Image (cartoon, rainbow, N blue to C red):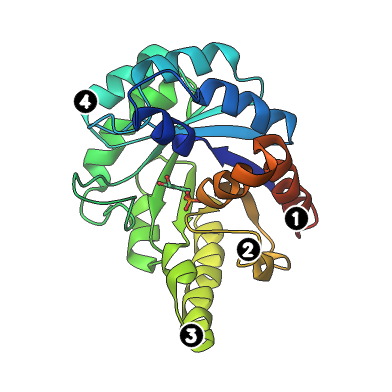
Amino acid sequence: MPLLCVNVDHVATLRQARLGQEPDPVLGAHEAELGGAAGIIVHLREDRRHIQDRDVEILRRTVNTKLNLEMAATSEMQQIALTIGPESVCLVPEKRQELTTEGGLNCAGREGELQVFLAPLIERGMTASLFIDADPAQILAASQTGAQFIEIHTGHYANAKTPAAKKVEMDKILMGIRYAQDLGLKVNLGHGLGYVNVLPFAHVPGVCEYSIGHSIMARAIYVGIRQATREMADIVRCFAD
Ligand code: PXP
């Protein structure tokens, strides 16, 4: 059964809008867990626009499931991950001007560099994942970094405007999943997935985790984080293994 992991960055985005204390992503994570999240994801961005260091430190002590730290491949973030010790890390590209993560990490040609970066984290017992596009060259490169997982970027699929364009993106993802598995990688999916556009994945085997944030937090405005998570967890629970 694939798992649902919930990204609580948006709780922190709301808090940072007033630079105050509410709402607290730590409490948001607790609600998500009560709703059935199998893991909590936070992206500690270099510009600290939403999640703060304090959030990650407290979440490390309060998350009951598992904590996945999304981060750029910088020495500052590597040091933080080594200090905090989340269960898993996911390397993502970061651009200051972007609204959200816009594309996958470029791994091709950086295999050695990424391997050196990930080695101490894996040595410390963390699971390592690379957030990449469903591009065979990137998947092959990811398989040569020591990362055990890739997270295939589903944003292009989510943003595709026509059924034909969606099918093109879906086919790329399906091929990517199979290729990654052939190379011995485990596969997660994430970005832009919601209650409706996630449904075509119901019969897609081999996905370990769905990483979902925005749609759950948007729904949570009306029904609360626990219920919004439960609704998504109920969907994902029915998906193929
Ligand atoms: N996976 C990664 C690597 C991300 O950067 C994000 C967004 O923070 C997500 C998944 C979740 O995307 P969304 O908020 O669109 O569900």
Mark 1 → mark 2, Cα distance in angstroms: 9 Å
Q: Which mark is residue 198?
A: 2
Mark 3 → mark 1, Cα distance in angstroms: 24 Å
Q: Nearer the viewer, mark 4 or mark 3?
A: 3
Above or below: residue 192 compared with residue 46: below
* Residue 117 in picture, x, y percent from top left: 28, 32
Name which quarter of the figure residue 35 lies in. Answer: top right
Above or below: residue 149 compared with residue 200: above
Residue at figure coordinates x 49%, y 58% from the top left: 192
Mark 3 sits near ligand 1, with its Cβ under 8 Å away: no
Callout 2: helix, strand or loop? loop
Q: Which residue is mark 1?
A: 235
Residue 66 in view of the camera: no
Q: Which residue is mark 3?
A: 162
Q: Which residue is mark 4?
A: 75
Mark 4 → mark 3, Cα distance in angstroms: 41 Å
Residue 151 in view of the camera: yes
Observer-nearest of 145 and 75: 75
Q: Amino acid at mark 4?
A: Ser
Q: Earlier in the sequence, mark 2 or mark 4?
A: 4
Callout 1: helix, strand or loop? helix
